Amino acid sequence: MRTRTKLALSLVALFSSLPLMVATGNGYFILLLLIGLPAAILFWFDLGRELRAIPTPTRSERALGLAMGIPQVLFGLLCAGIGLILVAWILYNLLVESLPQFRIPSLPAFAVGPMMIVAGLGWARTAFRRASLEQDDPEQDIPD
């Protein structure tokens, strides 16, 4: 299935979840939202990367590929910013003053902030980069 089709299906799931929840009164349609939102974000990034990797793009393909990188930069910077805030909040509570709502987190909780910073900066850094598109070569899958 092509990335465009996957993106379209995830956007349909995303935008149909709220009207279906309101119209039917069934809360299970929130699953469409929980699946559609992350899928739409990731397929958006993939489609932008594929458009930027076309060897000889038309002007519209090139412009669309660059335009699809803007939300990726914003999402990456938002992710990195949230990670910085988490790290600062944990360090403030450990080193300066422990607030009443702060509980000492476990070791994996300490890793969430730095991981968000690294992932967010990675997304922001690769948003406009022209990378080679990885194609599956069917002849490589056939053993000799």
Image (cartoon, rainbow, N blue to C red):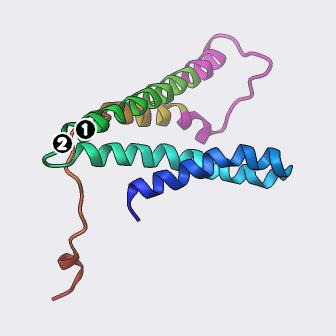
State the SS at label 1: helix
Residue contact between numbered discs 2 and 1, judged by CB atoms under 8 Å: yes
- Find out whether residue 135 is within the magenta segment: no
Outermost residue toward the bottom in this view: 144
Q: Which residue is painted at 86% across and 49% down in the image?
A: 25
In magenta stretch: residue 103: yes
Task: Report the front residue among 50 and 89.
Answer: 50
Which quadrant of the rendered structure holds the N terminus? bottom left
Disc 2 marks which residue? 58
Q: Which residues are magenta?
A: 87-112
Q: Amino acid at mark 2?
A: Thr
Q: Secondary structure at mark 2?
A: loop
Which sits in the foreground, 20 or 3? Answer: 20
Location of residue 120 in the rendering, given as x and y in whole percent from the top left corner: 43, 32
- Provide the residue designation for mark 1: 60
Kind of residue at badge 1: Ser
- 94 on left or right of 44: right
Residue at position x 21%, y 40% from top? Answer: 130
In this rendering, the answer to whether 43 lies above or below 69 is below
Nearest the eye: 17 or 137: 17
Q: Is residue 76 placed above or below 95 in the rendered structure? A: below
